[in-house]
Amino acid sequence: MLPDVTTTDTAGLAFDLRDALGPIYRRLIAEKSLSIGQSRALNRLANVGPATSAALAASEHITPQSMAVIVADLERAGRITRSADPTDGRRMIIEITEAGRAAVEADRRATNTWLAAAVASLDDDDRVALAGAVDVLRKLATR
């Protein structure tokens, strides 16, 4: 039976949701080999294409200095390359390398493997409830 949720219960529901999602999020992060910042930067480069460090920083809502550290670490690891912008030699264009794509894919596999095993351990009723909750969680993410 589903709990009775009224408008007065929304603060409690929000707390319970955060309390339930927190350990899942932390476990997913623990499965990754990349830091959160590295993962986000590489994913943006993989999905959107080459960018400047300033554009990456703006897209991730972090300071240019923080992104510079992430970019330097990724470059040292061979996961990105930097080259002069052909239209403005003062700027550097950052591109993901095959090693960077492989690191992103390895992290996706690792997190999906853990999460799929966790979902498989649920009974049928819980999996049905979870499937219904996914659309609701997507709606929450766009708010």
Image (cartoon, rainbow, N blue to C red):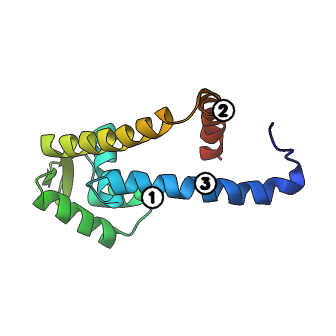
Residue type highlighted by circle 1: Arg
Residue type highlighted by circle 3: Ala
**Of the residues under marks 3 and 2, which one precedes in the sequence?**
3
User: Does residue 140 appear anywhere in the picture?
Assistant: yes
CA distance separating discs 3 and 2 = 15 Å
Residue type highlighted by circle 2: Ala
Crowd tier of the residue under label 3, counting other residues whose Cα lies within 10 Å: few below 14, some 14–19, many 20 or above: few
- Residue to which mark 2 is pinned: 129
Crowd tier of the residue under label 1, counting other residues whose Cα lies within 10 Å: few below 14, some 14–19, many 20 or above: few
**Of the residues under marks 1 and 2, which one precedes in the sequence?**
1
**Which corner quadrant of the image does residue 92 belong to?**
bottom left
> Which residue is rendered at x = 42% and y = 37% of the image?
117
> Which residue is rendered at x = 29% and y = 57% of the image?
38
**Which corner quadrant of the image does residue 131 belong to?**
top right
> For the residue labelled by badge 2, is the local secondary structure a helix, a strand or a loop?
helix
- Residue to which mark 3 is pinned: 20
Q: Which mark is residue 26?
A: 1
> For the residue labelled by badge 3, is the local secondary structure a helix, a strand or a loop?
helix
